Image (spheres, grey):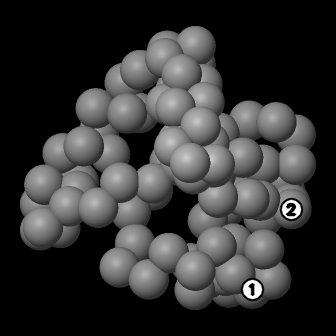
Amino acid sequence: MLRCGDKSLYTGIAKDVVRRVFEHNHDDALAAKYTRGRRPVKLVYQEAWATRSKAGKREYEIKQMKKVEKERLVKSFSRAAKK
């Protein structure tokens, strides 16, 4: 999940997360339309899944969450990263 410059959250899937975040920030041709106008973006949450299919299902679940639920995920991720 990315935090956009306007404080909104963007959810997507990628094999190479570092490359994908770079693309969202620097490449108009490869960035998602949503993130192009909301730069800069910063990685604030991620999960690893064994298959693209499972990752896609989880992406759908996250996209169905209310913003407050997504913010809880982000908060738990930032706490775990500090340990």
Q: Position of residue 68 (x, y in %)?
A: 58, 13
Q: Secondary structure at mark 2?
A: loop
| Residue at image location 82% in from the left, 36% down from the top | 7
Q: Position of residue 67 (x, y in %)?
A: 58, 19
Q: Position of residue 24 (x, y in %)?
A: 69, 72
> CA separation, marks 1 and 2?
12 Å
Q: Residues within 10 Å of mark 2 (few under 14, many from 20)?
A: some
**Vertical comparison of 43 with 68: above or below:** below
Q: Is residue 28 visible?
A: no
Q: Position of residue 1 (x, y in %)?
A: 54, 49
Q: Secondary structure at mark 1?
A: loop
Which amino acid type is shown beneath numbered disc 1?
Asp
| Residue at image location 45% in from the left, 54% down from the top | 46
Residue 19: numbered disc = none
**Vertical comparison of 18 with 47: above or below:** below
Considering depth in this image, is 64 or 69 the residue closer to the camera?
Answer: 69
Q: In the rendered image, which quarter is residue 49 located in?
A: bottom left
Q: In the rendered image, which quarter is residue 35 located in?
A: bottom right
**Mark 2 sits on what residue?**
40
Q: Mark 1 or mark 2: which comes first in sequence?
A: 1
Q: Is residue 62 visible?
A: yes
Which amino acid type is shown beneath numbered disc 2?
Pro
